[in-house]
Image: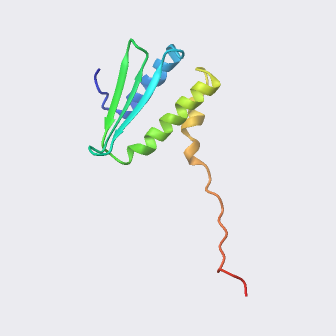
Amino acid sequence: MVYITSWDEFVDRSVQLFRADPESTRYCMKYRHCDGKLVLKVTDNRECLKFKTDQAQDAKKMEKLNNIFFTLMARGPDADVAEAAGKDQMEPQATKKGRGRKQ
């Protein structure tokens, strides 16, 4: 098991691995607070892909990968993952701006 250093390469190869055999592909995430390390692993019992990071900003990337896998699992391996990856670009909800209690 070799760690992949590039995030984009890890995502691309993980999606390819899932699409090749969706029935036996597994996705695992492990976080060790004492080390501050996050390890993501995708395997189908023949090939194992791993990505390790200690950067807090990679948590958002992990959320996007979760959305991609949820989309593939729910809609099938032929689903368009570009839609799932772009969900964070949604408009923020409008907030009410008030001055407190009306008198």
- The image shows residue 100, relative to residue 67, as above or below, that is below
The residue depicted at 34 percent of the width and 27 percent of the height is 50
Q: Position of residue 1 (x, y in %)?
A: 29, 20
Considering every residue shown, the one lying at the far right of the view is: 103
Choose between 6 and 23: the one closer to the eye.
23
- Seen in the picture, residue 18 relative to 37 is either above or below; the reply is above
Residue 47 lies in what quarter of the image? top left
- Residues 20 and 8: in front is 20
Q: How many marks?
A: 0
Q: How is the image coloured?
A: rainbow
Instruction: Give coordinates of residue 52: x percent, y percent.
Output: 31, 34
Vertical relation: 27 (above or below) 23: below
**Residue in the image at 62% along x and 53% along y:** 91
Residue at the top extreme of this rendering = 46
Residue 77, picture quadrant: top right
The C terminus lies in quadrant? bottom right
Q: Residue at x 50, y 20 (%)?
A: 18
Residue sitting at 43 percent across and 16 percent down? Answer: 44
Residue 14 at x, y = what percent? 44, 24
Spot occupied by residue 94 in the image (x, y as percentages of width and height): 66, 62
Q: Is residue 37 left or right of residue 99?
A: left
Q: Is residue 3 left or right of residue 96?
A: left
Q: Is residue 71 left or right of residue 11?
A: right
